[in-house]
Image (spheres, rainbow, N blue to C red):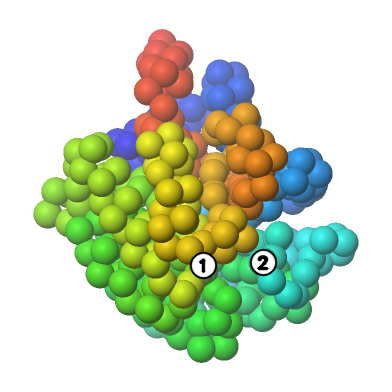
Amino acid sequence: MAASRSHRFEHAAERLTITRKVRDRFVPGATQHRVLDSAAALRDSGRLISIDYLGEQVTDAVGAKATTTAYLDLLDALGRRADAAHEGVRPLEVSLKLSALGQALNRDGEKIALAHAHRICARAEQIGAWVTVDAEDHTTTDSTLSIAAELRTDFPWLGVVLQAYLWRTLGDCEQLAESGARVRLCKGAYDEPASVAHRNAAAVTAAYLRCLRVLMAGPGYPMVASHDPVIIDAVPALARETGRATADFEYQMLYGVRDPEQRRLAAAGNRVRVYVPFGTQWYGYFMRRLAERPANLTFFMRALVES
């Protein structure tokens, strides 16, 4: 996690062959063409997709506009595919980080991010796709949920991401479940202090299951974003308990993580959506994925230090 914030490590990592080999497992490519090919293969296997154009913490208006344009171009390309749909669960989705749309700008950052996100949602509506607003570190949570609430007045299908390891998330789940929102629940991928987040793995899992129970009991559409076998194994019982069929929620997993399990769940009749990132700004995302997989992390960091 510390390396994910280091420009020195980033420059060193970009030069390594081993980086490309491990990166390609989690990030299918830098270009729209590459990600569309990967998305098509996933759709052919019966899975749904959510595409993330990588980048966050944009510090200028030009960068925020460029990110917005990239999403609009991506949605145009997705719209030319035959499986876009306006009714029911939409197989195509994009995921947005509001900080990549200008949220962190010193002057009118929230207003700028809202305007950019609104344009993206409007284009998604036109082509029959969904949009989900990603979560970032805890300092952005209030702003992100506020912007998402405004967007949902025009786009009630908009999804939001909540991170179960934050102390506040159970309350956020209760509010969003009551409103019928589409909510992606993940454990959380940022290095948060104990004052705002659970730090123990078992406590995070327990918090996740408490939050998921609230979402499953509400009228919204829960998205179970986890690779943890404990959580995945608990879902069928929670669904039965709350009267949900397999069509009333979905599993979500990251591209390149537990692919056989993704296929197993889909083959059993479940909805499974794969989060597919692409773009040149892959480093922070890549390092967070390594932090979640100690074996890959050890292998990669040894190569990095010895380079």
The kind of residue tagged 2 is: Val
Find numbered disc 1 in the image and state the secondary structure of the residue it sits on: strand
- Please tell me which residue lies in front, 35 or 229: 229
* Residue marked by disc 2: 89
Residue 187 in the image: state x and y as whole percent: 35, 48
Q: Nearer the viewer, residue 226 or 243?
A: 243
User: Residue at image x 44%, y 39%?
Assistant: 233
Quadrant position of the N terminus in the picture: top left
Is mark 2 in CB contact (under 8 Å) with mark 1? yes
Residue extending furthest toward the top: 306
Q: From the top left corner, tell me how far across and down residue 133 is, in percent.
A: 49, 66
Amino acid at circle 1: Tyr
The quadrant of the image that shows the C terminus is top left
- Visible in this render: residue 100? no
Quadrant assignment, res 232:
top left
Give the left or right position of residue 5, taking residue 70 as reference: left
Q: Is residue 105 above or below residue 4?
A: below
Disc 2 on helix, strand or loop? loop
At 44% across and 15% down in the image, what residue appears? 299
Residue placed under numbered mark 1 in the picture? 221
Q: Quick check: can you spot residue 11?
A: yes
Percent across and percent down for residue 113 are 48, 75
Residue drawn at the location 45% of the way across and 21% of the way down: 296
Toward the left, the furthest residue is 195
Q: Quadrant of residue 173?
A: bottom left
- Which residue is nearer to you in this view: 114 or 166? 166
